[in-house]
Amino acid sequence: AQKVTQAQTEISVVEKEDVTLDCVYETRDTTYYLFWYKQPPSGELVFLIRRNSFDEQNEISGRYSWNFQKSTSSFNFTITASQVVDSAVYFCALSEARNNAGNMLTFGGGTRLMVKP
Amino acid sequence: GAVVSQHPSRVICKSGTSVKIECRSLDFQATTMFWYRQFPKQSLMLMATSNEGSKATYEQGVEKDKFLINHASLTLSTLTVTSAHPEDSSFYICSAREGQANYEQYFGPGTRLTVT
């Protein structure tokens, strides 16, 4: 069974601070995908990144960066120089093949990030 | 590309009535659609997976007779909450995937259901 754990339920930072959101996953598959989504107050999920299990290269996209460590089963997300608009709930998710019925996506519990001006 | 819409975005209904929520893939054919439920300040929980033309597969603990899912075409899936009760009030989100080999799911904007 797959599982995603986001130990931080809420984080509060002051604008311009850097913040890292942790994500630890469990899976028996050797092939899987990891995702991060942002959910602003409007509720719509915003896709941020997808990373497959064979690609451990870190990725940077503007103020966002991701650190994938297979050895520790972690896929952490860092926001540099946070802004008020970054305030949202962030979900880490894992997708692995399940039978032939398709791939199910398991979400972590989410981390609520509050960036104060 | 890869846009998924949901209708309605918000609905309020009385206890005992049924509510239908539509999920549409606007610019691609969705072989598989997923329905999630999200209670306030909680994560998304998968309710069911539906493949076009076949019966939905429900997750453990989800009543198939209460949450009717129909995926009659490659661009439309519907979720009907039958005999709704206040505890069914939640945020319902659908997602769609194009093709079996594609791990990417595209999410709809969600439907907030309030049962009074």
Image (cartoon, coloured by chain):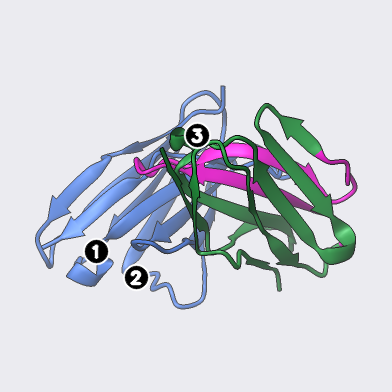
Chain colours: A green, B blue
Name the residue rendered at 71%, 74% in the picture: A1
> What residue is shown with label 1?
B82
Q: CA distance from mark 2 to mark 1?
A: 8 Å
Q: Position of residue B41 (x, y in %)?
A: 38, 62
Q: CA distance from mark 1 to mark 3?
A: 43 Å
Could you tell whether A70 is left or right of B2 in the image? Answer: right
Q: Secondary structure at mark 3?
A: loop
Could you tell whether B58 is left or right of A106 in the image? Answer: left
Q: Secondary structure at mark 1?
A: loop
With respect to residue B97, does A99 lie above or below?
below
Q: Tag count in the figure?
A: 3
First to last magenta residue range: A30-58
Name the residue rendered at 62%, 43% in the picture: A18
Q: Position of residue A99 (x, y in %)?
A: 74, 63
Asked whether the residues under the numbered discs 1 and 3 touch, taking CB atoms below 8 Å apart as contact, a structural biologist would say no
Q: Mark 1 is on which residue type?
A: Thr
Mark 3 Cα within 10 Å, few/some/many (few <14, many 20+)? Answer: some
> What residue is shown with label 2?
B65
Could you tell whether B25 is left or right of A41 in the image? Answer: right
